[in-house]
Amino acid sequence: MSDTDTCLAAVRAEIAKAVKASRRNPDDVALVAVTKQRSAAEIEPLLLAGLRDFGENRVNEAAEKWAPLRSRYPQVRLHMIGRLQSNKADDAVGLFDVIHSLDRRSLLDALVAAGEKAGRYPAVYVQVNIGAEEQKGGVAVDDLPAFLDAVRASPLPLTGLMAMPPHGKQPGPYFALLAELARRHGVDGLSMGMSGDYPVAVMLGATALRIGSALFDD
């Protein structure tokens, strides 16, 4: 068994344990392999193991890397997990199937315009700044209802909410807050949980886990 296979098996085992403990349906929790700054040679073992959801945080890097990989693995779904500049909306709409970082009206408008030109609309998560951190992207909690209304009025499919807890703090209360916001606003999807905290995220309702370093033995 390769190092990648060993890491993937360990991650899947942890997810399964958390799913069982929280009495959830395992089909409701998706593993998005974060492959930013990873080479095609590093990614291919995950593709051979059956993973089809992959996250990138830079449009140009993803376009260059995934063009040849997608020709061999056409069922891949690419997820944009990094902060997206509005001037990259055309490229992002053409490349990504899901965008996890919709966080402002200017980006919403740019994605809608790009979708109209391309004839396709990626699914979106609205990023919430649950820690009220000035340096981090995301819609403020108080502004979330109006922003969700704007997304729902657009042709972009609203998949759910996304958030990253403040660094160095226990993630559980922040994941619980995001889950409560989703319930309050009638949203099903929760993109939360990374390599250091994904079991907690599963316990608190995550439906998409963005896991990178744990899959590569970093």
Image: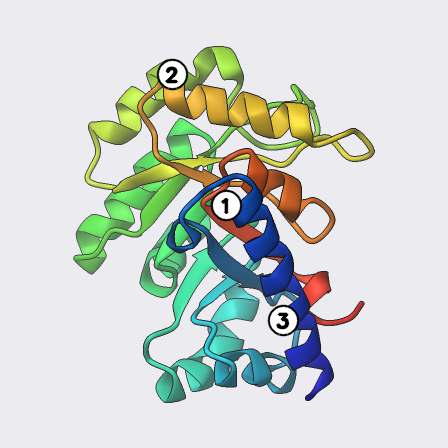
* In the rendered image, the vertical position of residue 20 relative to residue 75, given as above or below: above
Left or right: where 30 falls relative to 166: left
How crowded pointer 3 is (Cα within 10 Å; few <14, some 14-19, many 20+) is rated as many
Element type at marker 2? helix
The picture places residue 176, in percent across and down from the top left corner, at 57, 25
Depth check: give the residue in front, 96 or 16. Answer: 16
Image point (56%, 21%), residue name: 177
CA distance for labels 1 and 3: 32 Å
How crowded pointer 1 is (Cα within 10 Å; few <14, some 14-19, many 20+) is rated as few
Q: Amino acid at mark 2?
A: Arg
Element type at marker 3? helix
Depth check: give the residue in front, 162 or 207. Answer: 207
Image point (47%, 71%), residue name: 63
The picture places residue 36, in percent across and down from the top left corner, at 63, 65
The picture places residue 164, in percent across and down from the top left corner, at 63, 36
* In the rendered image, the vertical position of residue 109 relative to residue 148, given as above or below: below
How crowded pointer 2 is (Cα within 10 Å; few <14, some 14-19, many 20+) is rated as few
Task: Identify the residue position indicated by label 3 in the image.
Answer: 8
Residue 125 seen in the current view: yes
In primary-sequence order, the first of circles 1 and 2 is 1
Task: Identify the residue position indicated by label 2 in the image.
Answer: 184
The answer to whether mark 1 and mark 3 are in CB contact below 8 A is: no
Quarter of the image containing the C terminus?
Answer: bottom right
Q: Nearer the viewer, mark 1 or mark 3?
A: 3
The answer to whether mark 1 and mark 2 are in CB contact below 8 A is: no
Element type at marker 1? loop
Q: Amino acid at mark 3?
A: Leu
Q: Nearer the viewer, mark 3 or mark 2?
A: 3
Image point (59%, 32%), residue name: 137
Task: Identify the residue position indicated by label 1 in the image.
Answer: 85
